[in-house]
Image: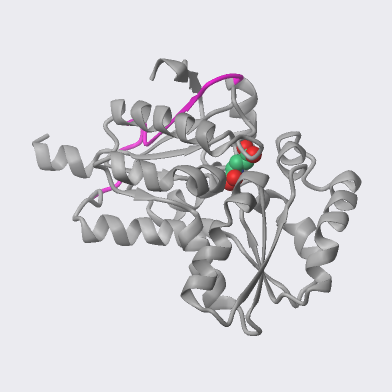
Amino acid sequence: MNEKELLHNAPIGVFDSGVGGLTVAREIMRQLPNERIVYFGDTARVPYGSKSPETLTRYSRQIVRFLQTQQVKAIVIACNSASACALEVLEEETALPIIDVVRPGAKTALDTTRNGKIGVIATEATISSGIYKRYIEESDRSVSVISKACPLFVPLVEEGLWEDPVTDEIARRYLSELIDSGIDTLILGCTHYPLIRSTVGRIMGEKVCLVNPAYETARALKRLLEEKGLESEKRPELGTELYRFFVSDAAEKFQRFANSILSYGILSAKVINIEDY
Ligand code: DGL
């Protein structure tokens, strides 16, 4: 393979605090079937949503350094909390193109709303960064954003309680003020939340459109690869490790989870010590 082919065939680096980013990886697999992926889930340090911006920046830097050792050609921050706190620093420090999940999600919500009232549910880190509110209100001053941190959603998802009375009860409490506010669009501002989409959708009612930023993120990645002339030209042959998974802890649990989300069965997830990077 010559240098150009090597670059085209290089993988996309995708990362999250754990399994949430698999909802983004799944969409990349669907929309860009020719692309290889190296996924890193920081299962030893999840959740990210309760951490400070400084800690999330440190974690994100380490992960980007690790992904660079895997010769990735672009990076997708498949985590809203890391996108909210570390995107600017990573863009400044890294030569690789980076896609986050927040800007694509904000854009989709702006294209979707009819009454100019958008809700955002996300982790505490994302909500307190004010990033969705800023992006949306800077793009269109007539739109208002109502935000709500939902810290218990990530552990419920990680525990597999996607359809459960406990999740239902907690979701009702979190979402009641969003229902009262009259929003017509709700951003699932954490990559774990698409896994409880049906619960959230049922409680919000069918008049509220749910935005999963993963779809638009994969589209943004496709545009970026095209612009930079970095697309992989053909689908790698089977057995050439199209998708590789790394975690910082509990590989078996991650594998089980991944296999329940992805249509592609993952054979192994390798544990690495992320503190080494
Ligand atoms: N899935 C991540 C996000 O989009 C982080 C969740 C967490 O670890 O708290 O924010």
The C terminus is located in which quarter? top left
Residue found 31% across the figure and 28% down from its top: 70
Residue found 29% across the figure and 25% down from its top: 69
Residue 66 drawn above or below residue 221: above
Q: Nearer the viewer, residue 269 or 212?
A: 212
Specify start and end residues of the magenta stretch as a single range: 234-250
Give the percent coordinates (x, y) of residue 271.
Answer: 50, 18
Does the magenta stretch mainly form a helix, a strand or a loop? loop
Q: Nearer the viewer, residue 92 or 106?
A: 92
> For this view, does 229 lie left or right of residue 26?
left
The N terminus is located in which quarter? top left
The stretch drawn in magenta includes residue 248: yes
Give the percent coordinates (x, y) of residue 177.
Answer: 83, 65
Q: Is residue 236 visible?
A: no
Tell me the colour scheme of the image. one colour
Residue found 65% across the figure and 24% down from its top: 253
Residue 102 drawn above or below residue 93: below
Q: Nearer the viewer, residue 136 or 203?
A: 136
Q: Is residue 269 visible?
A: yes
Residue found 79% across the figure and 56% down from its top: 199
Give the percent coordinates (x, y) of residue 36.
Answer: 34, 40
Give the percent coordinates (x, y) of residue 267.
Answer: 51, 26
Q: Residue furthest left?
A: 2
The stretch drawn in magenta includes residue 245: yes
Q: Nearer the viewer, residue 191 or 2?
A: 191
Q: Quadrant of ligand 1?
A: top right
Residue 106 drawn above or below residue 13: below
